[in-house]
Image (spheres, rainbow, N blue to C red):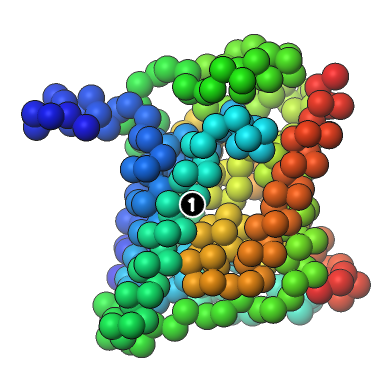
């Protein structure tokens, strides 16, 4: 934090990455802000379900409900898109993420040497759309996120943050699941995929 | 009114996801490899602030801005689906490097190929809905 308050210092501070102890508590405030302003619990993955219910013709019980009553969640998702655009365009400096040295070494071991930007351009780029690895990570990965969050009944927001914030046992179990899957992918499957 | 508030909250959340690098594949890999405190610090401090907030709202009986009683709904006690579905999600999280919020944020911040991940996620929901009766919950 700047010691002297000036516009220049503020812009400078806001443009640098925010440390976890600033960002985490603000994310935590999403919980009371949702409850007080919207009288809804914080969560995002349901938006996938609402889109599915809205656009895919079907007769499945799970997708027959009044999604319009939850359309605020789609607006919230649109807001995330907008906020991310604003942050990336106007509130950021173009520097690689300050990863730990161990993480940099691990990425290089995976053959990921371009550590610029937020996501590895060597995996997540339109120009690589013909590569099986890119298709696997984007499409199969996205499929698992959609299937898994609905099966579990929530994601990092709905279970890990909202659920744990009011001491829900199913949420704790879900978070154990998140890490079971994440650790299997990280420690066993990714080294094979990048071998 | 509700939509305006939702848009504002979403915008704030999107800004944080970028500024705190939560949408970064690199940060997610670093987390699962236990190589940095960054993501654990974010999720942990968010839960602490969230839990204190819920306690305050409940103990003071704070109402929503529309004047209604705030209901914090319990999660369905389906432990099998929480664990199994959570595991499926975790596999996808470590592949895409993003949970649903960050997927939207990635599209907004320029990694537009993630549109395909969102579409695939919506198909994933459909497949879950079709198989739901046959899956353990």
Give the left or right position of residue A139, taking residue A93 as reference: right
Which residue shows up at 74% across the image and 75% down it? B78
Which percent across, then down, holds residue B62? 29, 81
Q: Quadrant of residue A172?
A: bottom right
Q: How many marks?
A: 1
Choose between B40 and A42: the one closer to the eye.
B40
**Which residue appears farthest toward the right when viewing the image?**
B134
Chain label for disc 1: B
Give the left or right position of residue A154, taking residue A18 as reference: right
Choose between A156 and B52: the one closer to the eye.
B52
Relative vertical location of residue B7 with respect to residue B29 in this rendering, above or below:
below
Which percent across, then down, holds residue A113? 64, 12
Which residue matches tag 1? Answer: B44
Which residue shows up at 55% across the image and 32% down it? B36
The C terminus of chain A lies in quadrant: top right
Which residue shows up at 74% across the image and 18% down it? A110
Choose between A122 and A101: the one closer to the eye.
A101
Asked if residue B93 can be seen in this view, the reply is yes
Which residue shows up at 57% across the image and 44% down it? B103
Badge 1 marks a residue whose secondary structure is helix
Asked if residue B11 can be seen in this view, the reply is no
Which percent across, then down, holds residue A136? 80, 34
The N terminus of chain A lies in quadrant: top left
Q: Quadrant of residue A164?
A: bottom right
Which percent across, then down, holds residue B97? 64, 37
Task: Determine crowd level at label 1: few under 14, some 14-19, many 20+ residues with C-alpha closer than 10 A.
Answer: many
């Amino acid at each position: 934090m700047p010691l002297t308050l000036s516009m220049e210092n503020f812009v400078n501070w806001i443009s640098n990455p925010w440390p976890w102890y600033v960002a985490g508590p603000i994310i935590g405030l999403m919980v009371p802000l949702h409850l007080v302003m919207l009288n809804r619990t914080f969560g995002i993955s349901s938006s996938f379900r609402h889109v599915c219910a809205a656009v895919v013709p079907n007769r499945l019980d799970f997708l027959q409900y009044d999604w319009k009553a939850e359309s605020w969640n789609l607006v919230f998702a649109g807001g995330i898109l907008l906020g991310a655009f604003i942050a990336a365009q106007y509130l950021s400096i173009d520097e690689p993420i300050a990863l730990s040295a161990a993480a940099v070494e691990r990425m290089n071991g995976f053959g990921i040497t371009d550590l610029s930007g937020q996501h590895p351009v060597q995996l997540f780029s339109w120009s690589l759309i013909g590569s099986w690895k890119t298709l696997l990570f984007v499409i199969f990965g996205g499929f698992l996120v959609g299937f898994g969050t609905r099966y579990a009944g929530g994601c990092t927001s709905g279970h890990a943050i909202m659920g744990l914030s009011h001491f829900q046992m199913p949420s704790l179990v879900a978070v154990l699941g998140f890490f079971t899957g994440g650790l299997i992918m990280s420690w066993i499957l990714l080294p094979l995929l990048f071998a | 009114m509700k939509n305006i508030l939702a848009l504002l909250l979403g915008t704030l959340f999107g800004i944080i996801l970028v500024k705190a690098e939560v949408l970064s594949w690199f940060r997610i890999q670093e987390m699962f490899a236990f190589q940095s405190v960054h993501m654990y610090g974010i999720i942990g401090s968010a839960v602490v602030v969230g839990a204190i907030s819920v306690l305050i709202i409940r103990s003071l009986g704070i109402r929503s801005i529309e004047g209604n009683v705030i209901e914090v709904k319990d999660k369905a006690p389906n432990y099998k689906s929480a664990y199994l579905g959570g595991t499926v999600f975790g596999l996808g999280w470590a592949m895409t490097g993003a949970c649903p919020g960050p997927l939207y944020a990635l599209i907004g911040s320029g990694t537009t190929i993630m549109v395909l991940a969102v579409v695939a996620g919506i198909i994933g929901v459909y497949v879950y809905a079709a198989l739901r009766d046959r899956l353990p919950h």
